[in-house]
Amino acid sequence: MKRRHCLLLLAPLPAHAALLESDAAQGVRAALERGALAAVSQLGRVDGFFAHPELKIELPGALKDAAKLLKATGQGKKVDALVLAMNRAAEAAVPQARDLLVQTVKKISVEDALRLVRASEDDAVTRFFETKTREPLTERFLPIVTKATEKQSLADKYNAVAGKAAGLGLLKGEDSNIQAYVTRKALDGLYRLIGEEEKKIRQDPVGTGSAILKKVFKLG
């Protein structure tokens, strides 16, 4: 019996099992590409961030309160220009994510795909995607954000004031540099929209109109 059991373990998977694995990989890749391209399209344009009710990039923490004082002293236009520049910088950076996101999608293994399809979290695919792309996208975004914000006279003042505020514990250290702050917020917004698209697919795979998404996420 033991010999027979071992032989069964070593036997190749039936054709339909292999097909399901292949479908899982194809479905996860399709879901990610769909979400990624939708997010890039929505955020990587004028007002993609600035006009978004939830993703608009505002000054962080204590600096937002400080901005109110600046406006009271007649520097409101400069503050508004800085906030606009922050959002325009994010909008300019996001399209640069497209190629890397698509390349990463194509590299997802069958094993990872199966695990992600079966995951109980409704944003498991997006979180996995983020671990693979956040660091390289940060490197791509930062120069673009830096170029877009350095034109603002308040950008250097932001960094000076933010550095002091962080030293006093009034601001998170990660928010003490405007370029790094905007880059992080741009990526947060990007992954959030990708995650929202994933949730839609999981909740209503039939509604996507995609045969592979319907097949994988309805059964997964």
Image (spheres, grey):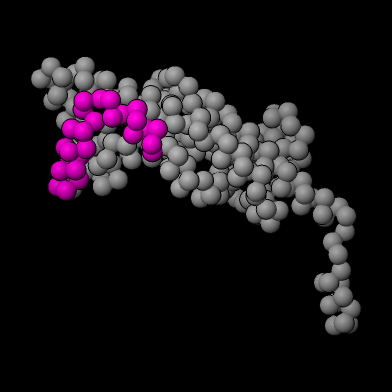
Depth check, front residue: 139 or 10: 139
Quarter of the image that includes the N terminus:
bottom right
- Numbered range of the magenta stretch: 142-168
Secondary structure predominantly adopted by residues drawn in magenta: helix
User: Is residue 102 something that shows in the picture?
Assistant: yes
- Taking the magenta stretch, the answer to whether it contains residue 147 is yes
Query: Seen in the image, is 21 located left or right of residue 45?
Result: right
User: Is residue 198 something that shows in the picture?
Assistant: no
Query: Seen in the image, is 152 located left or right of residue 207?
Result: left
Query: At x 59% / y 31%, what residue is drawn?
Result: 37
On the image, the x and y values in percent for residue 155 come to: 24, 30
Q: Is residue 168 above or below residue 82?
A: below
Depth check, front residue: 220 or 172: 172
Query: At x 56% / y 46%, what residue is drawn?
Result: 129
On the image, the x and y values in percent for residue 33 come to: 63, 36
All told, the count of numbered labels is 0
